[in-house]
Image (cartoon, rainbow, N blue to C red):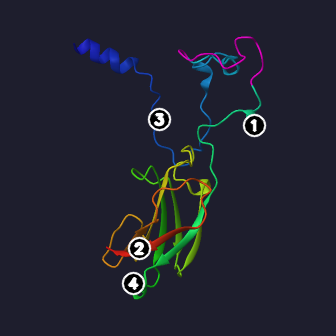
Amino acid sequence: MLALCVLALTACDRNLEPYDPNEQPREPDLSKIFPEGAESAEAPQPGLPPAPGEARGEPPPPPSETASAASPGAPIQGTVELAPELAGRVPANAALFIIARGGGAGPPLAVKRVANPTFPLEFSIGPEDRMIQTMPFAAPIALSARIDGDGNATSRSPGDVTGAAAGGPVAPGATGVVIVLDTPL
């Protein structure tokens, strides 16, 4: 057993060197892993059917003719209003978060932050506001908004006010959407 441990320790080729604070980052040498010319060869992924025309030797269609799974939709436009009875509840230095959720549940699809909002506030939220750029900005999209007194989206404080779009989820490109902030937290 001792012989195996000694053999394992002497055979280890991890090239551990002492820490050098002046060492500069550099690209790794991949020639030991990939043989020369391997970067130009594209192996098809197993289990996937050939692309249209690929089996007949045709070139792939131009990108303008292919649909992306994350193709963006048009922005949604509207107004955020504060209920009259809550007009004095907006703290100084508050932030307004306009939140779009796909299907109404789950993590936000898109978020827009507005510092020191004044009401009524015109808004536009669209694909450029997505949290994950590969997620499609597609219907149905539920909109809500929240005034956050400390400007931190992850915290909830007494005095924060929330509201949702009247009429439920909307489609990309919708205009005239009204979100009324009417529920104190």
Residue holding disc 2: 148
Q: Is residue 66 above or below residue 134?
A: above
State left or right for residue 50 relative to residue 147: right
Residue holding disc 4: 86
Mark found first going from the N terminus, 2 or 4: 4
The x and y percentages for residue 36 are: 68, 16
State left or right for residue 140 relative to residue 86: right
* Residue 169, visible in the rendered structure: yes
Please identify the quarter of the rendering in which residue 182 is found: bottom left
Mark found first going from the N terminus, 2 or 3: 3
Determine whether label 2 and label 4 are within 8 Å by CB: no
Q: Residues within 10 Å of mark 2 (few under 14, many from 20)?
A: many
Residue holding disc 1: 64
Q: Residue at x 52, y 79 (%)?
A: 117
Mark found first going from the N terminus, 1 or 2: 1
Highlighted range, magenta: 46-60
Q: Residue at x 48, y 72 (%)?
A: 96
Residue holding disc 3: 17
Q: Is residue 92 above or below residue 112?
A: below
- Classify mark 2: helix, strand or loop: strand
Q: Is label 1 or label 4 in front?
A: 4
Q: Residue at x 72, y 17 (%)?
A: 53
